[in-house]
Image (cartoon, coloured by chain):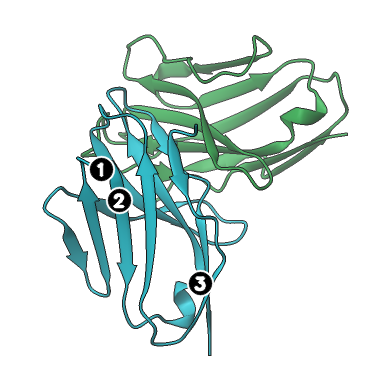
Amino acid sequence: GAGVSQSPSNKVTEKGKDVELRCDPISGHTALYWYRQSLGQGLEFLIYFQGNSAPDKSGLPSDRFSAERTGGSVSTLTIQRTQQEDSAVYLCASSLSSGGAYEQFFGPGTRLTVL
Amino acid sequence: RKEVEQDPGPFNVPEGATVAFNCTYSNSASQSFFWYRQDCRKEPKLLMSVYSSGNEDGRFTAQLNRASQYISLLIRDSKLSDSATYLCVVMGDTDKLIFGTGTRLQVFP
């Protein structure tokens, strides 16, 4: 079946512009996660949605970052007034439910470059 | 101190060799443990979960030592296709994954 998809696959933007990154999770998966991976760095948790619960935003690095998940499915990560340090690969993952018993499946990522 | 620490490597080993990776984690409340594999410029994929009793999947064996907060991965009979970065991953009392920076393995003919 279809895996997690993300769009765009690559995004180049100028410093100060806003960007929107999209994630389509696996159908039926109630948990959705956003991570980012900077060059030479490990994956860093950003935000987590589980069903209709309030999202866990504890990993968002600044108030320029926000995310929403509409209808319990598609999610959009928005970065306002992008900075060069925002350049990274943004990865989305989904799982059937929350908790360690449920594998998180990752999408291919969006490579963001801020000039 | 990082929450999950790994030796970045690279580990360069010949085909057929046995290689072991270690990882330590700082949060004693961590509940679940995993090894993920990430190929160059690809997304991470789950290799195996790690259980307290230790578990094996073919050539791969994972061990967990809760007392020492230490996780290991052993790869026997290395194949060229095992070349990748291996990520040690911990899930705490929330459901977010905490990743180590990864250990790079290069298997040569």
Of discs 2 and 1, which sits in the foreground?
Answer: 1
> Counting residues from the N terminus, which is met first, the one under dot 2 or under dot 3?
2
Q: Look at label 1 and name its amino acid.
A: Ser
Q: Which residue is mark 3?
A: B83
Q: Chain of mark 2?
A: B
Q: Chain of mark 3?
A: B
**In the rendering, what colour is chain B?**
cyan
Numbered circle sitting on residue B16: none
Q: Secondary structure at mark 2?
A: strand
Q: Look at label 3 and name its amino acid.
A: Ser
Could you tell me if residue A72 is visible in this image?
yes
- Chain in green (letter): A
Report the residue at 42% width, 35% height from top: B98
Report x, y in % for residue A104: 36, 41
Q: Which residue is mark 2?
A: B71
Q: Secondary structure at mark 1?
A: loop
Q: Residues within 10 Å of mark 3 (few under 14, many from 20)?
A: many
When asked about the image quadrant of residue B18, the answer is: bottom left
| Disc 2 and disc 3 in contact, CB within 8 angstroms | no
User: Do circles 1 and 3 both sit on a common chain?
Assistant: yes
